[in-house]
Amino acid sequence: MAILGAQMVLTLIMVSVIQKVNPHFSFAKWILCSTGLYRYLHPSDDILRAKAGIPKEKSSKGNHKNKYKQNGHVSASNGQFHIPRNIDIQLETVPVLTRDVVHLRYFAEYQWLVDFSVYAAIVYIISEAYHYFFPLKNEFNLSMVWCSLVIFFALKLLSALTVLYFQSEESIGERSMVIVACLVYLLIAMIVLIIDESILETGLEDAYASFNSSAAKFLSQQGLESSGPASKIVMKFFMALGCGILGSLFTFPGLRMAKMHWDSLKYCHDSKLKQILLNISFILPFILVILWIRPISRDYLTVRIFEGMEKPLLKPHIFETLRLVLVILVVVLRFALMPIYLQSYLNLACDRITDLRKEAGRITNIDFQKKVSSIFYYLCVVTLQFAAPLILCLYLTLMYKSLGGFSWTGLLFNESVVQNDSSFVESETNVRPTIAKISESDSFEIFEDQNLQDFNILESAQSLQASITDLKNVFTTEVYKGFLGFATWWSYFTLFATSSLGILYQSYFSKT
């Protein structure tokens, strides 16, 4: 590969675009500030005093006491006073502006994740178009580095949000729920990993067999006798452990998604179209999950021949493309509905005041104002919980497509797999003859020109290149297809399972 090949040029251009464009335009900021979102303002102390019938506090003069009592209400000099919980207050609304969100917690992290994922998507699209006309030959796909970084940032932010529940002494319930979810998903992952490949199409068996054989071959070439680097039981245990951790990271994002979906259906009761789109966006991850279950997906669509037909409904490569395209549809649809979900969350401020009116007793003005303002202050955290799992699922699918040898067109599936496999074979067979040619042709020159040192350097470089090529051959297309396919399916499964449990809880809570 050339030092400045097409992929490197594209990467450098995109890095320059990020530096120049990102300070002036941000897709993440556009979602929050330019899609019609509005927030509720908490009432001022003067409005609360007027509604509660409490006279305005006078400034202390001379030997005036710091606390006074009037009409049975105790008020301190710091401005705190008590009001009835059922006070009749109409909250004012204002549009969400840039100057309001830049100071919110996790805004910088949310902006970086969303904007970087957009730029990574642009790099991926351009790379895929370029590789369609000019296939890779012994080159590394740099767009996979961008996708890997997006996945790393998404996991890092989800982990940071989950760690918050372990740092606060008041989050005992949330902490327990995360631990229980991790153990439950660990058990489910262990059950899933023992399911036969004829039922759940994970591809892990072929991936392990390919990785173990190629790794054993690589170790033997390095002079190490080994039948394989790891046993199947150990590999599946660590995979189940990773699945449990991922399930715990998706717990509260899934529950938050369920809450926003339930509220969105309530606020969009006048629009049947929005309700249909919301329900479709919620159920589509379940469709993605069952597309990996062979008896009710692949066998039904690509093997079974219905009465009156001469061939199945779909060809295998078209079925693979269908799964990939459906992922894009899910992510695009949910991001299109994202303002509706976020507005349903912001409306919780009004719902809190409505629920407060049904209670008896009194509340301080500060606590009353916190019930309203805390909703907006938590907006970027909620937005991250909504966007990060979707971005993670999307870029796992993109890596699954590229490294697994699939095609977006559904027409070059078999050819792309052969190209990916043959590239490794070609690189392995071409490098070694090169060394042999160099050693034969240059040996005569070495003895005549006394350039033994130059030849040793060249020979060492070629040997290093051959070793790197052998190491690259360990990770074949089958390995990527199996492990990335299972990771992709598990992310869809945990996202839908947690959201479904949240919907069941909201349904039960609304009836009680």
Image (cartoon, grey):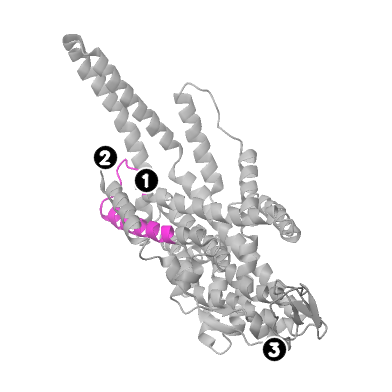
The mark nearer the N terminus, 2 or 3, is 2
* Amino acid, disc 2: Ile
Asked whether disc 1 touches disc 3, contact meaning CB atoms under 8 Å apart, the reply is no
> Which percent across, then down, holds residue 65?
78, 73
State the residue in front, 86 or 343.
86
The mark nearer the N terminus, 2 or 1, is 2
Q: Which residues are magenta?
A: 115-142
Residue at the limit of the structure toward the front, as seen here:
62
In the depicted structure, whether residue 357 falls above or below residue 367: below
Q: Which residue is mark 3?
A: 51
Graded by Cα atoms within 10 Å as few (under 14), some (14 to 19) or many (20 or more), the crowding at tag 3 reads some
In the depicted structure, whether residue 413 falls above or below residue 356: above
In the depicted structure, whether residue 334 falls above or below residue 153: below
Left or right: residue 97 versus residue 25 is: right
> Which percent across, then down, holds residue 363?
76, 77
> Which percent across, then down, holds residue 200?
59, 56
Q: What element does badge 1 sit on?
A: helix
* Amino acid, disc 1: Asn
* Amino acid, disc 3: Lys
For marks 2 and 1, give the CA distance: 22 Å
Asked whether disc 2 touches disc 3, contact meaning CB atoms under 8 Å apart, the reply is no
Q: Which mark is residue 420?
A: 1
Q: Which residue is mark 2?
A: 3
Considering the whole magenta stretch, tell me its main secondary structure. Answer: helix
**7 drawn magenta:** no
Q: What element does badge 2 sit on?
A: loop
Residue at the limit of the structure toward the right, as seen here:
72
For marks 2 and 3, give the CA distance: 72 Å
* Residue 312 visible to an observer of this rendering: no
